[in-house]
Image (cartoon, rainbow, N blue to C red):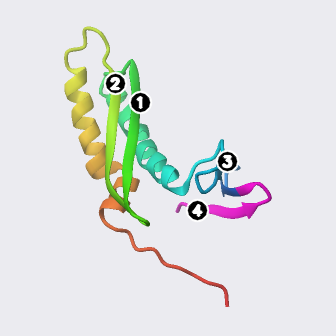
Amino acid sequence: MASVNVERTEDGYVARNDRGAEVAMGGGDEQGVFTPVELLLAALGGCNIVTVEPLTAKRGHRLVRLAMTVHAEKVETSKLGPITVSYDVELPEGDEKAEEVFRAVAHRAEEKYCTVSNALRNETEVILELPG
């Protein structure tokens, strides 16, 4: 089970998990905070990269550099268009199989193993519980 607490503070908004980590949020005008949409994109990128890295290394192909940019445009006030995940990878020198393994793992991670990708793709139900 995954759970976070999100609340308004004196400085804006914050999300906290049970392990004590915090992420500051805002509407987009504040410096040093993420918007909720940016956090969604970060969750998608994070889910993919923390899956790709160990699976690629486990197959004996430790990438020199592994980074990504996750991008989406708002197509309506409260609707995103397609989300693009762009990898930035530096392959190990002399490892002819590294690119093939990385590509296979990246596709498999996005299509099968990334919970966030699956939640977005399959339109996970959101249940609203109000007090009273």
Circles 1 and 2: CB atoms closer than 8 Å: yes
Q: Given this view, does label 3 or label 2 mark the residue nearer the observer?
A: 2
CA gap, disc 3 to disc 2?
Answer: 28 Å
| Amino acid type assigned to the residue bearing label 3 in the image | Ala
Q: Residue 24's spot in the image, x, y percent? A: 66, 50
Q: Residue at x 53, y 79 (%)?
A: 128
Q: Earlier in the sequence, mark 1 or mark 3?
A: 3
Going by the picture, which residue comes out furthest to the top? Answer: 94
* Marking on residue 89: 2
Q: Residues within 10 Å of mark 3 (few under 14, many from 20)?
A: few
CA gap, disc 1 to disc 2?
Answer: 6 Å
| Amino acid type assigned to the residue bearing label 4 in the image | Ser
The quadrant of the picture occupied by the C terminus is bottom right
Q: Given this view, does label 2 or label 4 mark the residue nearer the observer?
A: 2
Q: Which region shows up in magenta?
A: 1-12
Q: Residue under label 4, please give it.
A: 3
Circles 2 and 4: CB atoms closer than 8 Å: no
Going by the picture, which residue comes out furthest to the bottom? Answer: 132
* Marking on residue 21: 3
| Amino acid type assigned to the residue bearing label 2 in the image | Val
On screen, residue 110 above or below 125: above
Going by the picture, which residue comes out furthest to the right? Answer: 10
Which secondary structure lies at badge 4? loop
CA gap, disc 1 to disc 3?
Answer: 22 Å
* Marking on residue 67: 1
Q: Given this view, does label 1 or label 3 mark the residue nearer the observer?
A: 1
In the image shown, does 84 or 124 lie closer to the viewer? Answer: 84
